[in-house]
Image: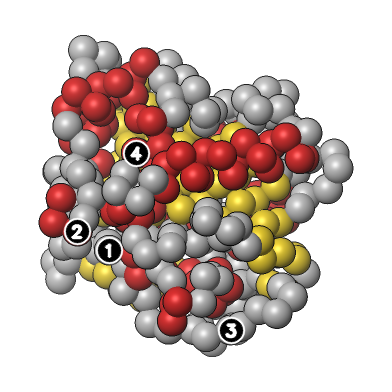
Amino acid sequence: TKVFESVIVEDGINYQFYDAGKDANALVVWFHGNGEGDYRSSGNNVAQMLANRGTVAWASDEAQEIFGKAHVMSFQAPDTWYYAQKDGLLAKAYEEIMAVVKETGIDPENILVSGCSAGGYMTTRMIIAYPELFAAAMINCPALDVADARGGETPTDEELKKIRDSRTAIWLVQGETDATVNTEACSKRLFNILTEGQEVTESTKAVEIASDYTTYQTKDGKYLMTLYETTEDNKLMFAEDYNVDGELEQVLYSNHWSWIYTLRNNPTNEAGVSIWQWAANQLNEPAKTGDLTVIAPYAMLAVLTAGAFVALRKKDEE
């Protein structure tokens, strides 16, 4: 059982925190999507943690083995991440991340970040604002194209070009088609800017039951993008064990829900290295656990928090 603590920050951003122990030397930061926002103004995202794995995946035994023990920090957007600049959320998140680094004594070079949809937008904005903060970023269907219409600011080409000067290694994940945030204007746009003038190779992997995918990567392995095949009905395919009988069956989800693949450590590069292992390899003294590639889905972790509420609702990510 993994235990998360609800941390309330006055005039800041509340978050859930998993303490991986005194010998942990890394931190994983997660920015949720818009559909996992502030439920009933609770300021507490425990329900979202349980509903979509976005937090608990990083505290799983698999992730902790790969990252060599890592604390987990899952922020709760006060309203929406699209207000990152308007409400000063970038500075608040940075200050709280650095406070955790200081309190835990981890290597400040060992911070990983991941976010989906609106959280992918927030992640991108954080890298632009703090280019030396993150060792690696796993960005899922970043909602860059809709930001202007939702209270944010779609990054300009010049802003995205600045990311090339950052130390952050980036792996983008999205469906080949995405009806919520356009793949061409989001992941592909960012990847093309990051890799301009560089040699890019591609590798396609067939996956039993679930969607096949193609991974594009630079020669140095700093920038990658995985695009998942969508069906004729424009859905993403996943292997689920809904009956808990040990038998996987194919299910179809929204073409926007590509973050599920990252949270299952599913994407791999051309050498077969999984996205989590790739991220761990960007850390100082990363865990040497071998190349963990596609892992079958496993049961949701139970999460205990003092005073937590559980209120599952239908995901409506944007």
Q: Are dots 4 and 3 in contact, CB under 8 Å?
A: no
Q: Are dots 1 and 2 in contact, CB under 8 Å?
A: yes
Circle 2 Cα neighbour tier, 10 Å, few/some/many (<14 / 14–19 / ≥20): some
Q: Is residue 146 above or below residue 26?
A: below
The residue carrying mark 3 is 310
The residue carrying mark 4 is 125
Is any part of residue 277 visible from this angle?
no
Q: CA distance from mark 3 to mark 1?
A: 22 Å
Q: 204 and 90: which one is in front? A: 90
Task: Say which label, 2 or 3, has the lower sequence index.
Answer: 2
Q: CA distance from mark 2 to mark 3?
A: 28 Å
Amino acid type, mark 1 = Glu
Q: CA distance from mark 2 to mark 4?
A: 15 Å
The residue carrying mark 1 is 318
Q: 262 and 26: which one is in front? A: 26
The residue carrying mark 2 is 150
Q: CA distance from mark 4 to mark 1?
A: 16 Å
